[in-house]
Image: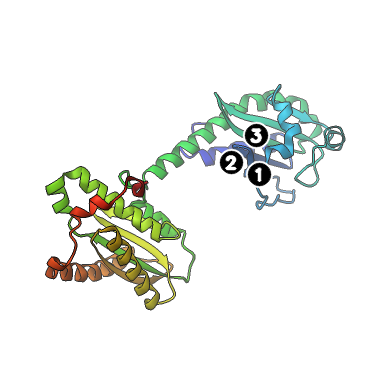
């Protein structure tokens, strides 16, 4: 429970329990609404490992187990075959002889259950009070893990636009498949300062949110990031420069239709990405060339300030 890393704490507790109970396997099934998924596994050294590819399943499929949880948080099944005949319970795993189920619950929040598979027969009875006591510790570790994940997730989201920030970009890049080509579209709004000066910063915020919404709607994978201020990045897999040029032209059309002026530039790169700053610098150079051209011909462009009149509140959701 006092582990800095809750995941490490869960693994250590499962390992000690598995050896103490001389079990073949330990599993944790986490629940979400009506579905369950196995999230943590422990296998005895001499046991054939259980597949980690088990698909999520509904609580209804194991209703016999959850009926027991209505009256007892920990219960044992000494004879799985007899339990199956009496209840219709269909085991999802092979070679089940004895089982112990432990409800993982903390206050009003249910996290799922711990399942002990084939503990030694002589351990069955004395295991129950131990597991009753440890159930709360497992639930606390799962709660702490969820809190850490939520804090980490919030740290990757831009609070104004609800799209990802630079930290979210770095995390996103780690998950990209290798040997794929991507275009990094860098955008900078034109006229944000004038909007802030003439209409106030609330109007400027509305303009920034509108730009983020337009980029999200244009990106099938939602790989859109606010890099700071009025700067945005969109990442999309492409085949070549021609496809990237088409996407860039489509983005300009979207912004032009919305009455928002933006300068865009892009750079191509293949995964894995070794230095994102080099790619961003190249995309930024191309964007800046377009921004210079915008300022030269500014009298021919629609300024961003009046564009706010055309933005419907629902466009910002």
Q: Is residue 90 above or below residue 223?
A: above
* Residue assigned mark 3: 113
Position of residue 177 relative to residue 86, above or below, is: below
Q: Which residue is at the front of the view, 272 or 215?
A: 215
Q: Position of residue 249 (x, y in %)?
A: 32, 70
Residue 23, position as x, y percentages in the image: 73, 39
- The residue identified by callout 2 is 11
Q: CA distance from mark 2 to mark 1?
A: 8 Å
CA distance for labels 3 and 1: 14 Å
Q: Nearer the viewer, mark 3 or mark 1?
A: 3
Residue at image point 53% right, 41% down = 7
Tell me the colour scheme of the image: rainbow
The alpha-carbon separation of the residues under discs 2 and 3 comes to 15 Å
Using the image, tell me which numbered label, if any, was put on residue 42: 1
Label 2 crowd (10 A; few <14 / some 14-19 / many >=20): some
Where's residue 258, x and y in %? Answer: 29, 58
Task: Determine which quarter of the picture holds residue 190.
Answer: bottom left
Q: Quadrant of residue 236?
A: bottom left
Q: Residue at x 70, y 27 (%)?
A: 69
Label 3 Cα neighbours within 10 Å, binned few <14 / some 14-19 / many ≥20: many
Secondary structure at numbered mark 1:
strand
Question: CB of mark 2 within 8 Å of CB of mark 3?
Answer: no
Marks 2 & 1, CB-CB < 8 Å contact:
yes
Horizontally, residue 209 falls left or right of residue 3, namely left
């Amino acid at each position: 429970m006092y582990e800095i890393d809750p995941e490490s704490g869960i693994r250590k507790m499962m390992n000690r329990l598995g050896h103490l109970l001389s079990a073949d396997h330990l599993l944790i099934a986490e629940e979400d609404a009506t579905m369950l998924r196995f999230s943590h596994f422990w296998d005895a050294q001499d046991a054939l490992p259980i597949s980690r590819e088990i698909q999520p399943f509904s609580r209804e499929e194991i209703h016999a187990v959850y009926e027991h949880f209505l009256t007892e948080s920990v219960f044992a099944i000494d004879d799985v075959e007899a339990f199956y005949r009496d209840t219709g319970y269909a085991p999802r795993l092979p070679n089940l002889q004895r089982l112990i189920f432990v409800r993982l619950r903390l206050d009003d929040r249910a996290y799922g259950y711990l399942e002990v598979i084939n503990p030694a027969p002589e351990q069955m009875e004395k295991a129950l009070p131990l597991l009753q006591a440890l159930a709360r510790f497992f639930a606390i570790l799962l709660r702490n893990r969820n809190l850490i994940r939520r804090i980490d997730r919030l740290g990757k989201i831009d609070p104004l636009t609800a799209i990802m920030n630079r930290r979210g970009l770095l995390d996103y890049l780690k998950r990209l498949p290798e040997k794929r080509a991507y275009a990094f579209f860098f955008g900078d709004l034109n006229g944000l300062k004038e909007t802030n000066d003439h209409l106030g910063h609330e109007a400027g915020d509305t303009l920034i949110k509108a730009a983020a919404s337009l980029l999200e709607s244009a990106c099938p994978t939602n790989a859109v990031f606010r890099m700071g201020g009025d700067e945005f990045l969109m990442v999309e897999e492409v085949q070549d420069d021609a496809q990237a040029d088409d996407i860039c032209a489509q983005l300009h059309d979207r912004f032009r239709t919305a009455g928002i002026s933006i300068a865009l530039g892009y750079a191509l790169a293949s995964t894995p990405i070794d230095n994102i700053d080099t790619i961003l610098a190249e995309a930024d150079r191309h964007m800046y060339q377009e921004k210079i051209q915008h300022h030269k011909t500014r009298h021919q462009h629609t300024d961003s300030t009046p564009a706010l009149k055309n933005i419907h509140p629902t466009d910002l959701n």
